[in-house]
Image: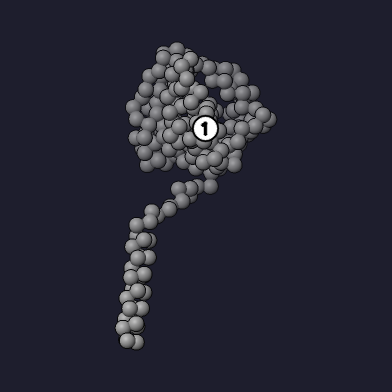
Amino acid sequence: MKLIRILLLLLAVSLGVGWLVARQQRAPVRVDPVAATSPVRALLLAQPFELERPATHHWRAELPQYTRGWILVLECDPLLLPRKQTVEPALACDGELLDRLNEGAKHGRVVAILPRPGASMEAALESLCFVSPERPEAVDAGLLSRLWEQARDLHRVEADEWTLARARGGEAIRFEDRTQLEEHCAQLILEHAPEDRELAEGWLVPR
């Protein structure tokens, strides 16, 4: 009888260990996607676009107009993303301020527009970072150049990162105007930053 109890105990232990091993094998492996020190952690998506009617870049003092650029989805440090009415860091890419569309402060996902008037759309994007202007909409070309030169902790877009971001973005897309561009970006906000759903759904209401 004692031998039977010992055998049953050994069997139970064996089954328990086997269950734990199987459970660990089935459990998804969580890999930290952030290995960079830059507050801009990754370029997740990049899609080129064109506009039939010019749009205005309101994050620049000169209010330049543009008819082409990039739609970007970035992963950033969430601590730098909450909106403020005073000074706040602004996102920049290759010496140009991004038009950031959502807050993304919960999960760190930001959908942004990079206007590229006069710049080649063939070359890969190279660097992303936060800069610290007095107010983003007060930045002119001279100040932007100085801010970019002083920028630290740049996120360098690696070749494989760019290839993946382009694959996610897909082919170039053409819009009639800024309104259609925002509607497209609203879908990306719903996908990547659902905490900003109210903003995105507002853009999807017929205007």
Q: Residue at the front extreme?
A: 1
Residue at (43% x, 28% y) in the render? 187
Can residue 67 be seen?
no
Q: Mark 1, residues whose alpha carbon is within 10 Å: few (<14), some, or many (≥20)?
A: some
Q: How many marks?
A: 1
**Residue 136 x, y percent position in the rendering:** 61, 27
- Residue 19 in the image: above or below residue 62: below
Q: Nearer the viewer, residue 182 or 87?
A: 182
Left/right of residue 81 with respect to residue 126 in the rendered view: right
Q: Residue at the right extreme?
A: 86
- Residue 36 in the image: above or below residue 207: below
Quadrant of the rendered image containing residue 10: bottom left
Residue at (36% x, 37% y) in the render? 163
**Residue 105 x, y percent position in the rendering:** 56, 38
Q: Residue at the top extreme?
A: 53
Left/right of residue 130 with respect to residue 122 in the rendered view: right
Residue at (37% x, 27% y) in the render? 122
Can residue 144 be seen?
yes
Quadrant of the rendered image containing residue 23: bottom left
Amino acid beneath label 1: Asp
- Residue 55 in the image: above or below residue 151: above
Question: Mark 1 sits on what residue?
Answer: 196
Left/right of residue 132 with respect to residue 102 in the rendered view: right
**Residue 198 x, y percent position in the rendering:** 52, 28
Residue at (51% x, 23% y) in the render? 202
Which quadrant holds the N terminus?
bottom left
Q: Residue at the bottom extreme?
A: 2
